[in-house]
Amino acid sequence: MDDAYSVQTTAADSGEVDGLEQLMALKDADTFCVADHWGDLRGGADGLFDHDTRLLSRFVMTVGGARPSRLSSGVSQDNVFFICHTTNRPLPPMGGRSAPAGVLHIERRRFIRDRRLFERVRMVNHGVEDVLLPLSFDFAADFADIFQVRGTPRLKHGTVAPPTNDGRRVTFTYTGLDGVQRNTCLAFSEPPARLTGSKADFMFSLPKGRRVDLYIECGPDRCDQPDELRFRLNAIEARLSMRRRRRRGASLRGPRSPRFNDWLDQSRADVALLTTDLPTGPYPYAGVPWFSTPFGRDGIITAWQMLWLDPSLAKGVLTYLAKRQATEVSAFQDSAPGKIMHETRGGEMSALGEVPFGLYYGGVDTTCLFVALAGAYARRTGDFGLIRELWPNLIAATRWMTDYGDIRKDGLISYQRGADTGLSNQGWKDSEDSIFHADGRFPKGPVALLEVQGYAFAAWRAMADLASALGDDRQAEWADRAEATRALVEDRFWMEDEGFYAIALDGDGDPCRAIGSNAGHLLFTGLPSRERALRVTKRMLSAEFRSGWGVRTLATGQARFNPMSYHDGSVWPHDTAMAAAGMAKYGERRAVALLLSEIYDAAAHFRMRLPELFCGFERMTGEPPIAYPVACLPQAWAAGSVFLMLQSALGVNIDAVEGVVEIDDPVLPAGIDRLNVTELRVGEGVVDLTFQQMGTHTVAIPKRREGEVKVRTLG
């Protein structure tokens, strides 16, 4: 089962690695592990987590009392295994024998399956003499809630029982204030020479040229005894499960572009890693470590990014969110009838209401996006059976838009949090300082965000189209609402002197004249007039926004611009992708190819795995992009960005109702002269496409066609 894996650093003997470099993440369903480059859990954000509770907070391996010298480490390309290769430092004399440095190869191989961490420590003696190898593990289980780990203080805690052990396994027990007993079991295949509630000491005899394997398991229930067979069988199942997720939908390959293919493969693997198969279907969790849970907005946008290739994600997201649609008003949860969920959590603090995120609705945009995605899904698949099932949910969502979302009754969707525990800003830029006036003042509420009006416009248009298909007589009403929203945005948000849209309107209806990337999302919905869209595009492609690694969230020179901030000048790949897709709607495909090339260059510096965000400093020749130190890695909508940008650059639009794949003036990114799309399903048919650079033009060539699929080339 040896696998190609990404080597992070070579011969790194000492020192910690900061920021993004420290995140070695594995995930399966609602269980994930974050470790350092040695595979150690050392507190802080590290740990083995299950359903938002940290089961294992410390797990540190030492060899002869010291940390081994690291040769290389990383996560396999399919995201199943973490592998770390180390060698020994000089070992202390044992029975008159000692081993010099560098004669033992010690490999740690780890994966997660079925709520359990599996690890194999393989020790091989390459020396000329037999060796006695002292191996130790320090461990602890603090049962911290994910919000504690993120820094939210708690005044009271539950009860931790003293650990128990039976010679091979240690069991930790915690009874929370919510009355739930949580357990952690840590088990070893060999009985340690000494085992306590915090440490296991082994003494292995390694004859020259021989190897010894130690198997370890950790999970939330009593462990069976680890052994080679359990490790091997579960590893096979983990790999097969990941392979099934990676192979959903159509595939993309650049036949003569290995590095670009590496990016495509890594992005597809990251989406697969973060996707959990729930009873309602596949759902992409937002990101590891802080957001490994269903988020409404993130799930919808990721599903939209992948829609042209794999519609199953959109179906799973729509179905899951429909079942959690709000039915009552709650200030604490920021909920109202018809509203779509923002976030759900399963930990103790959420269960007790110490934080509102057990089932939280404080996203002003998610409901509109839910409706808009339903319309896009229906067009992409022709699956009106699902739309009929969701129709009551879609109607309820539109009622929320008019009855509760339109707080000021001015035709715009606004937000104002219901309780101090909720999010103060409730769009995708939800940090406290992300929405402001041109002079830096924070607006009083309720606030109407620019991009949310675009999502509302898309939602009303989707409802009109769906009503037409289903024979609902409200089609004209919803079409009129879409046009009314368009007129309001053009009238109230447009700033002629800036040639741009205001980021928001405050509670008095005055524009917040800050210049932000929110306008790119408005382009994505197709709301602006062509003349204004082109003016916005020109400015977003200027040095104000373009860092050279993508589009900044805020233009340089704005009052709160800070390239190291979370939302006020950083670069978010999904944000750049949304802006690029918006530009493509107005025919600006070469702009899309340019931005795609910049994001590709950034990905290359991040070893082909795009983080949630990175700093928005200007690109300097010969220097890499600057990482944001606590970004999620991987992040679903960052991983999905390449697929949305490629669809936009290639000009691909799919209408399964008509059985047509429409290709409008395709453009390939710089350095890519050919791209194959295979197994693209349209209704009951399948088509393969090749995009080939021919001089200054890109042509689309259908290679295989099964069933009634038409390919129509425009431009």
Image: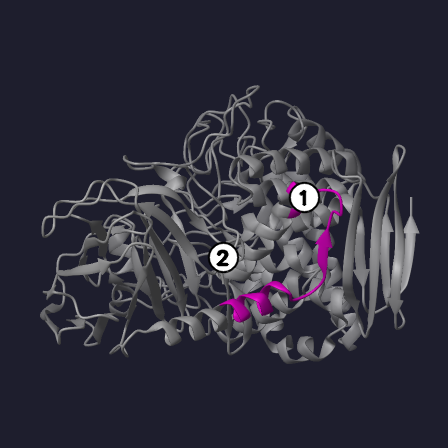
- Three-letter residue code for mark 2: Asn
Image coords of residue 23 (percent x, y)? 38, 47
Label 2: which secondary element: loop
Q: Which residues are magenta?
A: 239-261
**Front-most of 591 and 702?**
702
Residue 642: mark in rendering: none
Relative side of 23 to 647, left or right: left
Measure the C-alpha gap from mark 2 to mark 1: 19 Å
Label 1: how many Cα within 10 Å (few below 14, some 14–19, many 20+): few
Residue 14's place in the image compared with 140, above or below, is above
Of tags 2 and 1, which is closer to the observer?
Answer: 1
Q: Horizontal and vertical percent for residue 543?
A: 62, 22
Q: Is residue 9 shown to the viewer in this render? A: yes
Q: Nearer the viewer, residue 661 or 600?
A: 600
Q: Secondary structure at mark 1?
A: helix
Residue placed under numbered mark 1 in the picture:
258
Residue at horizontal 25 percent and vertical 40 percent from the top: 101
Q: State which quadrant residue 692 falls in.
A: top right
Disc 2: which residue: 79
Give the number of callouts: 2
Q: What is the quadrant of the C terminus in the image?
A: top right
| Residue found at the far top of this picture | 621
Q: Residues within 10 Å of mark 2 (few under 14, many from 20)?
A: many
Q: Is residue 200 above or below residue 75?
A: below
Q: Which badge, 2 or 1, comes first in the chain's sequence?
A: 2
What residue is drawn where x is 73% and y is 68%?
A: 378
Q: Is residue 484 left or right of residue 111?
A: right
Any magenta on residue 109? Answer: no
The answer to whether the residues at label 2 and label 1 have Cβ atoms under 8 Å apart is no
- Look at 57% across and 73% down and name the residue there: 319
| Residue found at the far front of this picture | 128
